[in-house]
Structure formats: structure tokens, C-alpha cells
Image (tube, grey):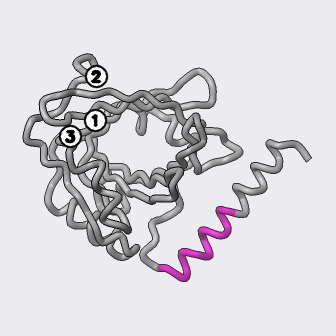
Amino acid sequence: MTATTLLSLVSSVMGLFYVGLQVLVPCLPPAPLSTSVINTDEYTGTWYFVAASVWDEDDLKTLQTTDSIVLQIQKNPDSTLKVTETMRIGDACLKNVTNYYAFPATSPFLFREDFDTIAVIWDGKYINCPTCIIMLYVGEDEEISTFLFSRDEKTTEEVIQEFKSKTECLLMEDMWRAPLKNGYCKVDDSA
């Protein structure tokens, strides 16, 4: 059995597990977007951070000094996505570039290039926001965070409350919103 076949089998089993889990936990979001869908023009491009929800309030501490975040998702020629994250912390603009493996055999899971983080993406229709995406990250220390991003710089209060409601249903009761006091950094302005 080849590694690709094994990964494909694991992905199929995980998909079935997720469908079964949705029956037990009705507030779970629909199946995550496949890696092939995320590679389309609909999901690549610029996304503005709106809010994050976590299970443990301590997991928000690293975000609480951040004023704003912009993601730029681009397709690489290989099976990776290049994610450029631009953050404003105080008056400083910082940039972080990370590649995620988007192999069809491991769909819908995206693996950061160092394999320390796994990401899954849901369509914003889950929270009645067709111009949004929801990203779930599982880090190396097993902390789980859910991030809401929008194509628009401003997001309605109704969308934010729907995100809060859906994540609270998953027992992610601690939420943090981007203050947006100093505006967004541009990718070219970041260090």
C-alpha cells in the first residue's frame, strides 16, 4: 500500500467519522471545504480578521496585543498554499509567511510546512456570511482556535453574533474581537 493510498484511506475514514459526529453534536459546522476548493479564486486572495473563539481563555493572550490582521492566501505551483499574515501590534506592522500543504489525499486538512499546525476551513455560509471563512487551527501544544475572516474590512454585528453563537455551541465560550483602532497594515508596509 502506497503512502498516498494510505493517506486517502485515512481521509475517507475521518470524513465518515465527522458525519457521524455531526449526528451526535448538532451544532457542528458542515463538512470543511476540500483542499481543491480552497485553491480556487473564490478562497484565495485577501481576508480580514474579525474575531477568534477558543476553549481556554489563556489561548487568547497572544492575540490581545494585536489590533488587526490581514491574510493573503495564494496558490503555489506545488501542492501548497502561501499564507501571508500581516499584523498591526501597536504602531508596528509585522509580517509572517507560512506555507500549508494542501494535498488531495489529506483533504480537508491543511498542514503547516513544519507540521506543527493543522488547519481546516469552513465556508462562511455556516454563519450566514457568504463573504466569510472560518478557520480552525490545532497547534503543536494542542490548543484549538477558531478564527473568523471576511473579504470586507467591516463586518456586521449580526455576523459576529452568529459566529459567537455557533462557537459557544461548541463550548468555545471565550471570544475576542479585533479592536481595529489603528487600521490595517499593507503587506508592503510590514517588516
Where does residue 24 sit, x and y in percent of width and height? 54, 82
Give the Cα distance between marks 3 and 2.
13 Å
Where does residue 30 sit, x and y in percent of width and height? 48, 64
- For the question of whether residue 120 can be seen, the reply is yes
* Stretch in magenta: 14-25
Residue carrying label 1: 70
Classify mark 2: residues with Cα within 10 Å, few (<14), some (14-19) or many (20+). some
Report helix, strand or loop for mark 3. strand
Residue carrying label 3: 68
Where does residue 13 sit, x and y in percent of width and height? 72, 63
Report helix, strand or loop for mark 2. helix
Q: Residue at x 22, y 24 (%)?
A: 186
What's under tag 3, amino acid-wise? Ser
**Disc number placed over residue 135 in the picture, else none:** none
Marks 3/2 in contact by CB < 8 Å: the verdict is no
State whether the magenta stretch is mostly helix, strand or loop: helix
What's under tag 1, amino acid-wise? Val
Residue 78 is left or right of residue 33, and the answer is right
Residue 92 higher or lower than 33, as above or below: above
What's under tag 2, amino acid-wise? Val
Residue 106 is left or right of residue 25, and the answer is right
Q: Residue at x 30, y 72 (%)?
A: 173
Question: Which of the 4 image quadrants contains residue 47?
Answer: top left
Give the Cα distance between marks 1 and 2.
8 Å
**Disc number placed over residue 187 in the picture, else none:** 2
Marks 1/2 in contact by CB < 8 Å: the verdict is yes
**Which tag, 3 or 2, sits closer to the chain's start?**
3
